[in-house]
Amino acid sequence: MAKIGFMQGRLSPIEEGKIQAFPWKYWRDEFTLAQRHGFPSMEWTIDQEGLSENPLMTEGGRQEIRRLCVQHGIEIPSLTGDCFMQAPFWKSDGERRTALLDDMATVLEAAAELGIRYIVVPLVDNGRLENEQQVEALYSGLETVHSLMGDGDIQIAFESDFPPKRLQEFIASLDEALFGINYDIGNSAALGYDPSEEITAYGSRILNVHVKDRILGGTTVPLGQGNADLPRIFQMLKETGYQGQYILQTARAVDGDHVGVLCRYRDMVDRWLD
């Protein structure tokens, strides 16, 4: 089976009506459920609200995460930093910017302690880059965390709403050993981007893939019901030599059977990848 993991929280009840948020009440249970249903990996999530209380960010929490990973045979290769999108340092200045960069450094250090390699930084929604000044503010801020990334022990994967050519130019200006792309299939479908143009432009820089389906100009829908040509995209990714993981960031179950629907999505993706 291909490396099909899930976004943390997708095996849990929805928190406060949010499609994605750290599952405070259920995060331990997801290790048991992942093992029981054959998921080898999860992508950790971390929000700005409650950042310092997230288990990743405390020594005791990291010890418990390590224990649960070993006990249940689960890997955590990646982390989605929604905190960076919710409070982007590239849109702040002064003491606020310094504090947010300190938060980023702390997240990178905590992730490194757990062996998490890929840090997804969403440049979408509140975090989207709206002008060249923000792009330069992002670049200058990244220079402050370079030393924490080693020689690629940790890599930042940017998720962006830039058109293919612009995203190719953006990522080409950053060190290939440290920075790459998180390719979100559903977001690209919603924006109407041509996947062959995208993957031709920057396929070699893709470090991580989020699997979901969206309607053109609209919201997330069950796999196969939106505008994403999933079988074609998976084939193109394979042809580029992509050997990373596919993280299910899929639509939530309308009937509350979040485990059942995630297993169905996993089986669908596995068939398309085969």
Image: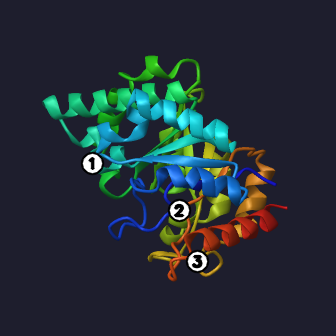
Residue at the limit of the structure toward the right, as seen here: 274
The residue beneath circle 3 is: 222
* Relative image position of residue 191 (x, y in whole percent): 48, 68
> Above or below — where is 116 with respect to 226?
above
Q: In what element is the residue under mark 3?
A: loop
Q: Residue at x 34, y 45 (%)?
A: 83
- Asked whether residue 68 is in view, the answer is yes
User: Going from the N terminus, do you reach mark 2 or mark 1 first?
Assistant: 2
Q: Residue at x 51, y 77 (%)?
A: 256
Quarter holding the N terminus is bottom right
Pick the front one: 90 or 24: 24
Question: Cα distance, mark 2 to mark 1?
Answer: 19 Å
Question: Cα distance, mark 3 to mark 1?
Answer: 28 Å
Between label 2 and label 3, give the one nearer the viewer.
2
Residue at the limit of the structure toward the left, as seen here: 94
The residue beneath circle 1 is: 49
The residue beneath circle 2 is: 10
> Above or below — where is 217 with respect to 59?
below
Side (left or right) of 131 relative to 39: left
Quarter holding the C terminus is bottom right
> Mark 2 and 1 residues: CB-CB less than 8 Å, in contact?
no
* Count of numbered circles in the view: 3
* Relative image position of residue 234 (x, y in whole percent): 74, 60
Structural crowding at the residue carrying mark 2, measured as other residues with C-alpha within 10 Å and reported as few (<14), some (14–19) or many (≥20): many
User: Going from the N terminus, do you reach mark 2 or mark 3 first?
Assistant: 2
User: Going from the N terminus, do you reach mark 3 or mark 1 first?
Assistant: 1
Structural crowding at the residue carrying mark 1, measured as other residues with C-alpha within 10 Å and reported as few (<14), some (14–19) or many (≥20): few
Side (left or right) of 138 relative to 205: left
> Above or below — where is 147 with respect to 9?
above
